[in-house]
Amino acid sequence: MKWPWTCQQGQPDDEAVDSWAKEGMHVSAPDGSFEQVWAASASRLRERRRPSAWELELAIHRLRIWIRALAGGLAVATALLVLIAVREHQRPQQSTRSGQRQELASEAQGRDLLSFVAEPAAHRRYDLLTDPRIVLGSVSE
Amino acid sequence: MITPVNFEQRIRGCYAVAYARVSRIVGSREIAEDVLQEAMVKAWQGLSKLRDPDKLEGWFLQIATREALAAARVERRSFSGPACVDAAEVADGKPGPLETAELAEQTGIVWEAVSMLSPKQRAVFVMCGVEDLTLREAAICLGITTGSAKRHMSRARNKLRVCLSRVSGDLK
C-alpha cells in the first residue's frame, strides 16, 4: 500500500485526503455475512408476526378488563331501563287518580254553586232568574 | 411487485456496498451487522411505501445509512476501526508478517483519524470521499441539505488533513 501524502510537500489536498482514506478504509463483507444477517432478519420478522406468550397474556388480561367494564355498563343500563319502565307504569295510575280528584272537585264546586244559588236574594244580586235553565233549588240541564 | 425471493436476491446484490458503508460509519463489524439486520427488517416492513420498485437497492442503502448514523451516535465508544478490517484483506497477494504489521499500523492510523470525526461528518466523508458519491446524493441519503453536507464534508476533510499532515511529518 502506497501512502499518497508522503511524496507531497506541505498540506495534503482534498484528493490526497480522500485517497488516503480510501486506501486505509478498505472494507469487504466476510463470507457468510449476508446469510447470517438475512437469517436473523427473517427470524425477527417471524417473531414479530407471532406474538409471544407474555403478549398473549396481556391481550387476555385487557380483554377481561373490557368484558368487566362492558358487563358493568350493561348492568347500569338495565337498571336505568327498569327504573324508567316502572315510572312509566306508575304514571297512568297517577293520572287516573288525579282525574278522580278533578271529578270530585268539580262535583264539590257544583254543590257550592247550588248552595250559593239557594242563598236568599242571590237571584236578585246576580240576575239568576233571567237564566231559563235555573230553577230555584236545582239546576236543570 | 417485490416477492420475498426477489427481495432477498436484490438485497444480496447490494449487500457488499451496504456492508462497507455501514462498517465505515459505525467502525465495528458486529454493530454493522446489527444495523444491516435492522435495515432489512425496516425495508421489508416498509416495502409498501416504496413507490418505484426499481429503486429498492438505493432505498435499502438509504435506510442502512440512516440506521448506521443513528447507531454511530449511540455507540460512539464502540468505534473500533482497525478491527473492522483484516490487514491481510487489503494487501495485494500474500503479504509477509512485516508487511502485514506495517499495513495494520497504517490502517489503524486512518481509522483513528476517522474516529475523530462526528458521526455525520464521517457519514458524509465516507459517501463522498471514499465512495465518490456527489454531495447531493449524500445529502439525499442522509436527509439533509446539500449545503449542510458540504459543510460536514469540508470540516471532515480539514480534520483529516491536520491528522494526515501530522502523520506525514512523523513519517518524514
Image (tube, coloured by chain):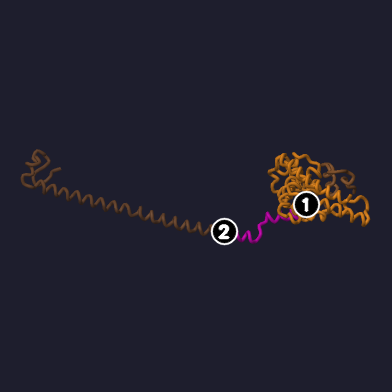
For the residue marked with disc 2, what is the amino acid?
Arg
* Disc 2 chain ID: A
Q: Which chain is brown?
A: A
Point out residue A31 in the picture as x, y percentages from the top left corner: 84, 53
In which quadrant is the N terminus of chain B drawn?
A: top right
Question: What range of the chain is rendered magenta?
Answer: A36-61
| Badge number at residue B25 | none
Residue at left offset 12%, top offset 45%: A139
Mark nearer the viewer, 1 or 2 = 1
For the residue marked with disc 1, what is the amino acid?
Ser
Q: CA distance from mark 1 to mark 2?
A: 49 Å
Residue at left offset 65%, top offset 61%: A53
Residue at left offset 79%, top offset 56%: B80
Evaluate if marks 1 and 2 touch, with contact meaning CB atoms under 8 Å apart.
no
Q: Is residue B48 left or right of residue A133?
A: right
* Vertical comparison of A6 with A76: above or below: above
* Vertical comparison of B102 with B156: above or below: below
Q: Which residue is labeled 1 in the image?
A: B115
Point out residue B52 in the picture as x, y percentages from the top left corner: 72, 39
Q: Do discs 1 and 2 belong to a common subunit? A: no
| Badge number at residue A62 | 2
SS of the residue under disc 2: helix
| Magenta stretch encompasses residue A47 | yes
Point out residue A16 in the picture as x, y percentages from the top left corner: 85, 43
